[in-house]
Image (spheres, coloured by chain):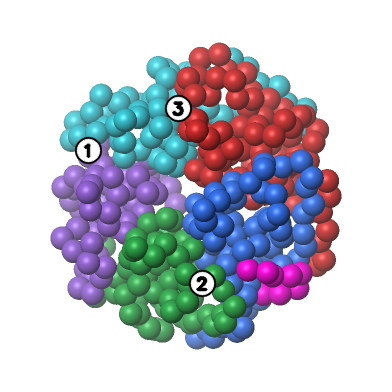
Chain colours: A blue, B red, C cyan, D green, E purple
Amino acid sequence: MHLARVIGDVVATHKDENLVGIKLLVLQPLTPERANAGRTLVAADAIGAGVGEEVFFVRGKEATFPFYPVEPPVDASIVGIVDHWNVEK
Amino acid sequence: MHLARVIGDVVATHKDENLVGIKLLVLQPLTPERANAGRTLVAADAIGAGVGEEVFFVRGKEATFPFYPVEPPVDASIVGIVDHWNVEK
Amino acid sequence: MHLARVIGDVVATHKDENLVGIKLLVLQPLTPERANAGRTLVAADAIGAGVGEEVFFVRGKEATFPFYPVEPPVDASIVGIVDHWNVEK
Amino acid sequence: MHLARVIGDVVATHKDENLVGIKLLVLQPLTPERANAGRTLVAADAIGAGVGEEVFFVRGKEATFPFYPVEPPVDASIVGIVDHWNVEK
Amino acid sequence: MHLARVIGDVVATHKDENLVGIKLLVLQPLTPERANAGRTLVAADAIGAGVGEEVFFVRGKEATFPFYPVEPPVDASIVGIVDHWNVEK
């Protein structure tokens, strides 16, 4: 999983039927020092996150697990809102 | 998922039988600012997209979900046409 | 999926038993302009491709689909020979 | 799999229900010479690792296997604590 | 799949129970010209490879196939020892 900040959302009327009702958010991955860590991506919101929040997301088929028994065609999902993290270097 | 612009298509007569009838499009991934974000790729069209449109696509085994119960050997599929997106930085 | 040119083959006598009889080809991924796009890889041939041909290949578990019901331990397979592609930039 | 050092942890109260009770650790991937090898990530702890330990982790759906029969939405898990490694160059 | 040279091994006493008895080797991926191709990784040995040998390995869930019916939490496995390869550029 990776840390990220929610920086936006995507609106799409015409989409796969299993995506209907799923909120699509734009994420900026973060380093533990809150620097940008690579490119933005679009993730399904499985947890009720909003713009500006720090979250962690999961990639791959595991991104569909929170939506079980539906299997939406998503490859990234927000699965937690971060309270804080602690890092020793 | 990632944002992308459809920039072309691929014609292949000789291919896996489960790919017959699936349109193959060339995608240029985009940043939220519409700059190119990495290399182009070939994606299956699950939604009826065309050249010039802005879409989002899914990677991995999830790319086969829209074609269920057929499981074509694809690792990227267009699953939505984007109306617009909003990003705060 | 990605476009590629077949540039060679790999000979391995001692290998997983589910790989016996599968041709292993070396691929150079290509941009739509036919420039090299990243590192070479080894792919299973699911379509009867040969050195010098332009193909497209699939990555991940989907690479095993053409060999069903056998599930060989492969993570990349050639699934089509390209006739041509069209790209607008 | 990759070698890594555990450098921190993540606290998240609001998360997917299948993540409850799973410790989330921050990993710094390492080269065999113990240099940093790319970006940090967040991994589920399947083995009882702690900050400062050298471990190896697995990515992808395989990261869920240690938690069977639960399938938490994780894409990276620590599956071993390293005693030592030997490398000839 | 990718070509690689086996350059070492990893010793881990405390690990996931499905990893017990599986040899863990350190791989240096190679280009067809035998230059280093990216970072080293740790792979499960499914074929009886040893340090110094040239092999090819598979990534992802497919890396567990050689160990069937056990599903060890591995994301890379050596599945063949290379006799030789031929590449035309």
Magenta region: A47-54
Pinpoint residue D19: horizontal percent, then vertical percent.
Answer: 48, 72
Quick check: C85 left or right of A59? right
Estimate the spatial distance between the alpha carbons at disc 1 and disc 3, rounded to whole Å. Answer: 19 Å
* Amino acid type at image mark 1: Asp
Q: Disc number at residue C78?
A: 3
Quick check: E19 left or right of A32? left
Element on which disc 2 rests: helix
* Amino acid type at image mark 3: Ile
* Amino acid type at image mark 2: Glu
Q: What residue appears at the point 31 percent right and 30 percent down from the top-left corner?
A: C69
Marks 3,2: beta carbons within 8 A: no
Q: Mark 2 lies on which chain?
A: D
Label 3 neighbourhood size at 10 Å, few (<14), some (14-19), many (20+)?
A: many
Q: Is D84 or E88 nearer to us in this picture?
A: D84
Marks 1,3: beta carbons within 8 A: no
